[in-house]
Image (tube, rainbow, N blue to C red):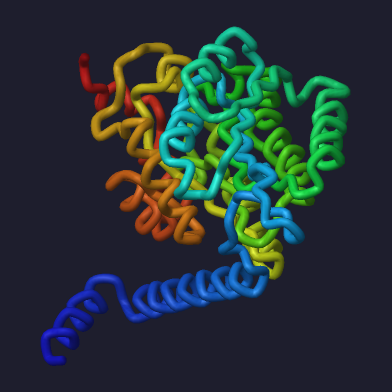
Amino acid sequence: MSVIRGIYSYIVSIFGNFFVIMVIISFVVTLIERHRLSEKRSSANRIRPVVLINPDTGEVKGERPRVAIIAGASGGLGAKYAQYIDSHPEELGINEIWIIGRDKERLMKVKNRLDMHTIAISMDILKPGCIEGFQKYMMKEFERHPDFEVGCFINCIGAGYTGTSYELGHEKECQTIDLNDKSAIMLTDLIVPFMKPGARIIELCSIASFGPIPNMNAYAASKALLYSYTRALRVELMPRGISVTAVCPYWVYDTYFIKRSIGRSDHPRFASRAENVVKYSIRAAKHDFAVSVPNPVSFASRIFMPLIPDGVLAYIMRTDTLKKNIKKK
């Protein structure tokens, strides 16, 4: 006990009582949330076989469709999520994958690498009529299979560009907000009615959601909106037994995002691998964590960035400082 008291006193001397108390309260709230979600799953008899059995004859009729829908799956993290679920379907109890993306050719390449039954849906979610068409498609699946359900929805749609607001212009900044926020909210609202207790939602946020980032202003603001939306959605859907996880990675170097946003293929130091981000975030969602920070930089950012005043943080987080922190290939 004396050792514990000593460690506690040391932490308090550095961060203060208020910070330590808030950390303890957050930990307790996390445990309560996970317990509530576990209870909902049990009460709804979520732990049941995926195989459908005729109750009269005992004959196996086939598998109950339990789908993972991955948006933004034509490349990058979305494609990695599809490959991981294809290799580890038991982790989330999935037996079918739907991948959504704008680039049909790249989407088909992802599909052809998967062994599980996969449906590739090529569409631009922001184009008029696309969301209605996708909704009709899901309704047809539900009518064809009354046991159809979405076991997991992973949103990887997003874009980001470096440059000041006046350099990028309103078109690029509005496009960033539409892709990062509007598409996520539209798809999530559409898919939730097809979910049952035990389902999971994973929204790709970023450490950019923890504070303002000059020279990447609209991107950071859009991720802050998505992060806030995801955290609130978790509370809204908890009574239904649906878990929601915000994934907040640092730069992921083996994706196209860095080249598109920075304008070069070199990557910042300590950047994550896509495979690690996917693996750790899937496990976090499986265990009903509210936030996944799959990298030491992400973990430190989540703890310390909210403690720094925004005015100071904005100067620290300027993306032009990336030039000093680029790792040559």
Residue at x-position 73% and y-position 54%: 54
Camera-nearest residue between 291 and 63: 63
Residue 304 vs residue 308, the one in the foreground: 304
As displayed, is residue 195 above or below residue 105? below
Residue plotted at (80% across, 20% down): 127
Residue closest to the far left:
3
Residue 147 place in picture, x, y as percent: 75, 49
Screen quadrant of the C terminus: top left
Residue 173, given in percent of the width and then of the height, sits at 65, 25
Residue 299 vs residue 106, the one in the foreground? 106
Question: Is residue 56 in view from this perspective?
Answer: yes
| Picture residue at 20% right of the left edge, 83% below the top | 9
Tell which of 117 and 208 is nearer to you. Answer: 117
Residue 315 in sight in this render:
no
The location of residue 52, given as percent across then percent down, is 67, 50
Vertically, is 184 above or below 108?
below
Q: Quadrant of the N terminus?
A: bottom left
